[in-house]
Amino acid sequence: MTTATPARPPTKSPDSPALWQAALSRGAGCLLAAQVMQTWFSSQTLSSQFVSPATWMHLAGWFSLKNNMPHDGQADILFSLVLIMVLILSATTWLLGATWLAWRRGVSWSAAFCRWGFYGGLWFGLLGLWDWISLGMQMIGAESLVEFWGLTPAFWCAMCLAGWGTTWLTLGGANPQATWVVTAGPSTRRPRLSTFWLWSMVAVYVVVFVTLNWRLYFNLLIPHGDSVMYEEHLWNVLHGKGFRSYLDQGLFLGEHIQVVHLGLLPMYLLWPSHLLLELCESLALAVGAFPVFWMTRRHTGSERAGLAAAAAYLLYPPMQFLDIEIDLKTFRPEAFGIPLLLLTLDQLDRRNLWGVVLGILGCLTVKEDYAIVLAPLGVWMALFGSSSTNKPGIDCRWMIFGILVAVGSVAYLYLATRLMMPWFRSGVEIHYAKYFSKFGETPEQIVRTMLTNPGLLLGEFFRVSTALYALMLLVPLAFIPLLSPSRLAVGLPLFGILCLNELARDPRHQFHAPLVAIVFWALAGGWPRAVDWTSRVIRAVAKRSSPLPNPLPRGGGEGTMLGTTASSLIRHAVWTSSLAMGLFFSLHPLSLTFWDAKSEWHWRKLYGPSQRAVEFAKIADLIPPSARVASTDFVHPRYTHHARSYDYSGYRRKVSGYESKVPDDTDYIVIDTRHRYSDMKTPAEIPEYRDHSEEWELLPDVTEGYFIVLKRKASQP
């Protein structure tokens, strides 16, 4: 790859908009933006998509000058105060943005000031259109649409923010005469620079999320169930207790055909800690940026496009929720499936048959759910597997292989759910059949109901939650995956199942993991079409709206300008969309919730010093490793390396004979009285101590009431 020396940009821009046009755009935009912000923050329901209820109460009181305090979820927000705030924000970003554009493009400051004022103001106005669309829906009486629209302020705000940032970055983009040509020669500066930035982004992600996950663990905020229990699997396997935790009905294979985390055993031998699992998961998720980069670069021929896609992946909220779920479950083996499936799709794009075979086998170790994606992927390979090869006609090898993958995936899913898992559960029905209780109690009943009662099926699928689920997956990527419909369709069966699942209708958990890979595969495939369509739109607008100021930079021919501008728009739109969505829908340091002091997700409450952790340190060595311990969920992870580690909760476990009691061989009981779900605060509230005090000894409290420890008394002769 070689770099041509860019020509010096012109020192002036004669086609810049006039100052009055810029002022009009900004003024009208600020009025509309202030109006919609008044609407949003007058309602606790609407504002809850941006700030916590307690913060809303504080802001509502301030913006109403405390004349009319909020009541019944409504507040009397003064438009004048909101407008002043918007004007200050607009003026600040206008001045700073114009200064950067003038320096970046080498134009006069006045030209940059007018240009950025005009185009930046358009996005302020577009933000305000949300209110007018809502009013139109109310006027026509579309109650369902009004209900849905009331749940979209954060999505709308994120799209406008991404568009605003994309416009600014595109106006200040590199000169279109500066092009990079991919050659077959030795590596040059440009690929090495891209590699540096890619590794840097991956490193930043790993450092940030490993830090967050480890802090949650140190602060006793990670639950054992569906998180640290996977570390217990490794410990029990190494110590001859079987592939299980004591939450399971038996061996874990009765819950899921999921063995991928056993691959961590060699490293776990050297460092037997849950912290290792957190590190490996964050690293695995971050590594998924590499196949995303490769696939996008291959389809676009652009290193920059590949980097933008990789950045979007690392900023993608649905991917990040595999690292830290909304309920603070920080380790899920499903996360390893994202890089595995991405690598498989990359090998498919390269037409490496054996690479695809190995990738598919790896995906099947992650969870049986991946077969739901692999089956339609096999159909795609049979239909389109030869579309990118140099051979004319149909490649029978890929057609046959695709059919085998589709049939084999369906057969594997049946064997896993109807034979293997029930066998490990002693014939008891698989547990997630209850997630579709409206359709039946067994998989056969569920499928039969779906086929014979299409009304119920469609009624459950076409819901507001389905639309929000789709928006959560597509808005962070500027809807570009829709331009590769055949690839995106591979994920439709799983998407439909998730929308029907009564527990999985929220992409802030782990169920959607395979869809992350499919969406980015579709992003790579749809990118060239997005650039082409954008070029056509720019050309049409330029021809039909000659009085409007020309946003295109000077230099080069029309085709070069259009292609460069379109490529820049798409490139910036992708990663800024993920960044903007993360502002409202993530838990990382770039999100609002991270800094909302009154939110339960505030950094100090989750990652700052924890008094619970300080108090637990006083009893950390109290119980010997040879003991059998029953403990509540959030302190449970500290006892997984003991002889037995039982769950103390309202769930009836097999180890206790499916009765509401601790197992008979329990030596100690540890109650965490201050975790978020604790319903026991004093020893008198613990059934074992209250009803059988002759069997249990209350150990002295050295934790100021944070933890209660009971020890079984020695048996009397």
Image: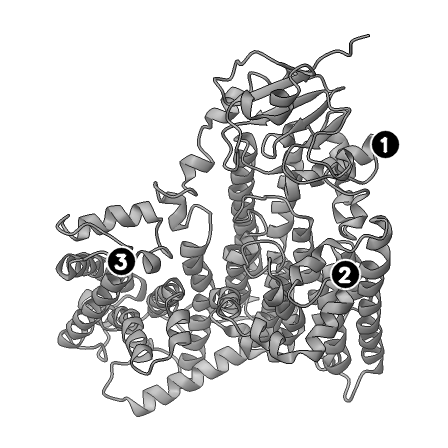
Q: Residue at x 73, y 53 (%)?
A: 431
> Distance between the Cα atoms at labels 1 and 2?
30 Å
Residue 551 in sight in this render: no
Q: How many residues crowd mark 2 within 10 Å: few (<14), some (14–19), many (20+)?
A: many
> Which comes sooner in the sequence, label 1 or label 2?
1
Q: Residue furthest top?
A: 717
Mark 3 touching mark 2, by CB under 8 A?
A: no
Residue sitting nearer the eye, 449 or 589: 449
The answer to whether 162 is drawn above or below residue 652 in the figure is: below
The answer to whether 106 is drawn above or below residue 482 in the figure is: above
Q: Which residue was labeled with disc 3? A: 41
Residue 464: image x %, image y %? 48, 69
Which mark is drawn over residue 286? none
Q: Look at label 3 and name its amino acid.
A: Phe
Residue 685: image x %, image y %? 55, 26
Dividing the image into 4 quarters, which one contains the C terminus?
top right
Residue sitting nearer the eye, 704 or 612: 704
Q: Which residue was labeled with disc 1? A: 240
Q: Which of marks 1 and 3 is in front?
A: 3
Residue sitting nearer the eye, 82 or 255: 255
